[in-house]
Amino acid sequence: MSYPSRVKIVEVGPRDGLQNEKEFIPTAVKVELVERLAHAGFANVEAASFVSPKWVPQMADGTQVMESIERRPGTIYSVLTPNMRGFEGALAAKADEVVIFAAASEAFSQRNINCSVDESIERFVPVAQAAKQAGLRLRGSISCSLGCPYEGEIAPAKVLNVAQRLIALGCDEIDVADTIGVGTARRVYDLMRIITEQVDPARVSGHFHDTYGQAIANIVASMQAGIHIFHSSVSGLGGCPYAKGATGNVATEDVLYLMQGMGIDTGVDLDAVVDIGQWISGHLGRKSASHAGNALAARKGAIACS
């Protein structure tokens, strides 16, 4: 069994990780989080979201965050853009990459953005065209790729269909997202193989939530299927406001510890990320959800407690 010599980790904590927090996080804290993560070596940081504050109030300060961060050369700063209004905000804020999203589940699409999967993809056509015309990277995320809180298990053919349509829109990368964390290693491996028979594996990433403690196993299974891009969230921050019971994204510290132990290069400083995870957890008033992060912090006597 072969594994990649290097993987890219997309840090999603500042956006996907914080969006579900009920108490508003000060803009200055968000800015510091983005800056510290970039300086830890991440090539790609998901920094903000340009969605209506009515739906995601935690992300209402996206413009201020993007205007305030001190940019690290070589780092891609991504933002979520659900429509042309969001895209225009992202463009004005000098985002490097815009992220569009569709679900593999009809029921989730209706609950999340009040339209069908087909309608959601059609809505993103002008956003995708504008992004390409502006020379921005375009990433497409597929929610509920392994299971839906309303439909249950999702057929791989549905995920492949959405992936192919997002590629046709011009997406540079496609995120296969286990939004509610129900995937297991065999199912993840099989799904990734089905997708990569039709889509270049270099353009496919794994986005796993750790609801059932399977995210690390699912990352290993994905690497076995030829995937070498993964999303993670510092200290396991996250959840989904439209998927009851879904816990955070897989913790970045756990992913980095895995890669370090397997001799796989990430270009990211694990010790720095452990410190960042303890810092943001302390600010939120709770213990980090990262097993590796807490263990490594305990060695240094720096663990954050609630």
Image (cartoon, grey):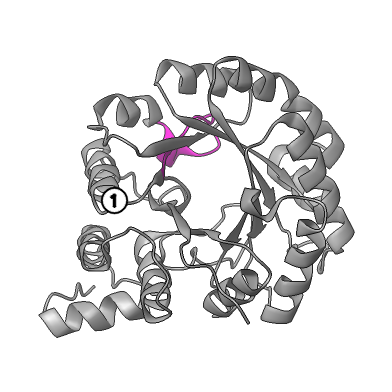
Q: Residue 128 placed where, x, y %?
A: 67, 25
Tell me if residue 11 comes above or below residue 259 in the rendering: above
- Would residue 157 be found to the left or right of residue 234 on screen? right
- Answer with the quarter of the image where residue 73 lies: top left
Question: Which quarter of the image is occupied by the N terminus?
Answer: bottom right
**Residue shown at the point (38%, 69%) measured from the top left:** 256
Q: Name the kind of residue labelled 1 in the image.
A: Leu
- In this view of the protein, which residue sits in the foreground, 160 or 146? 160
Please give left or right for residue 171 compared with residue 79 in the image. Answer: right
State the residue at coordinates (35%, 51%): 42
Q: Is residue 65 left or right of residue 103?
A: left
Q: In the figure, residue 180 lies in which quadrant?
A: bottom right
Q: Look at mark 1 in the image and give the residue it sits on.
A: 37
Measuring from the top left, give residue 181's x and y in whole percent.
62, 69
Residue depicted at x 64% and y 74%: 224
Residue 65: image location, x then y, percent: 31, 31
Quarter in which the C terminus is drawn: bottom left
Q: Which residues are magenta?
A: 45-60
Q: Nearer the viewer, residue 87 or 175?
A: 175
Give the vertical position of 101 relative to 175 (above or below). Answer: above
Q: Residue at x 23, y 48 (%)?
A: 39
Q: Residues within 10 Å of mark 1 (few under 14, many from 20)?
A: many
**235 inside magenta stretch:** no
Element type at mark 1: helix
> Can residue 91 be seen in the rendering of this structure?
yes
Kindly tell me whether residue 146 is visible in this rendering.
no
